Amino acid sequence: MNVRTELILSGVLGFIGVALGAFGAHSFKNTLLDMGTLESYKTGIEYHLIHAVVLLAIAISGRYEFGSAYLFILIGIILFSFSLYFYALFKIQFFVFITPIGGVSFLIGWALIVWEAFKLKI
């Protein structure tokens, strides 16, 4: 991926995270979500937004060494956060089994950041 694409993806994911958070707080809260699924939804939003900022930081750095970390964190947002959104909204149990795969993807992304930082010659 190039820096332009990474920046666009980071911005789009940040926008989607804020929009879904607002919908959860104002629209879904009183209609679609019970207390248990509302907490799952909020967790998805929290991890989504935190990691969207991480993606933005990686993109702004322009360091190609962090490309794999970017990819794993991107996959983490999709698998972790979006599986929680779908579970909370549609109550389909299958999505709960995808969430941990996204969590592992986040962990790999963070580990790659550490690994690549150790290798930097600065």
Image: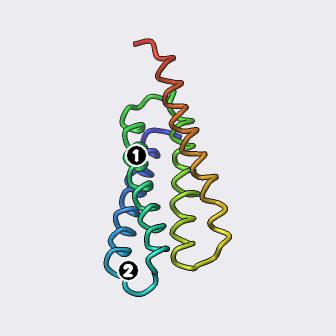
Element carrying mark 1:
helix
58 sits to left or right of 91: left
The residue mark sitting in front, 2 or 1, is: 2
* Badge number at residue 29: 2
Q: Amino acid at mark 1?
A: Leu
SS assignment at label 2? loop
Q: Residue at x 42, y 37 (%)?
A: 58
Using the image, determine if residue 94 lies above or below residue 46: below
Above or below, 35 relative to 79: below
Residue 92 image offset from top left, x and y in percent: 63, 76
Location of residue 51 with respect to 113 vertically, above or below: below
User: Which residue lies under the disc numbered 1?
Assistant: 7
Q: At 37% across and 39% down in the image, what residue appears?
A: 57
Q: Quadrant of the C terminus?
A: top left
Q: Dot 1, how many residues are within 10 Å of its Cα: few (below 14), some (14-19), or many (20+)?
A: some
C-beta proximity under 8 Å, tags 2 and 1: no
Q: CA distance from mark 2 to mark 1?
A: 31 Å
Up-down: is 73 above or below 14? above
**Label 2 neighbour load within 10 Å: few <14, some 14-19, many 20+:** some
> Of residues 14 and 83, which is closer to you in this image?
83
Q: Position of residue 29 (x, y in %)?
A: 38, 80
Residue at x 51%, y 27% (from the top left corner): 65
The single residue placed furthest to the front in the displayed view is 36
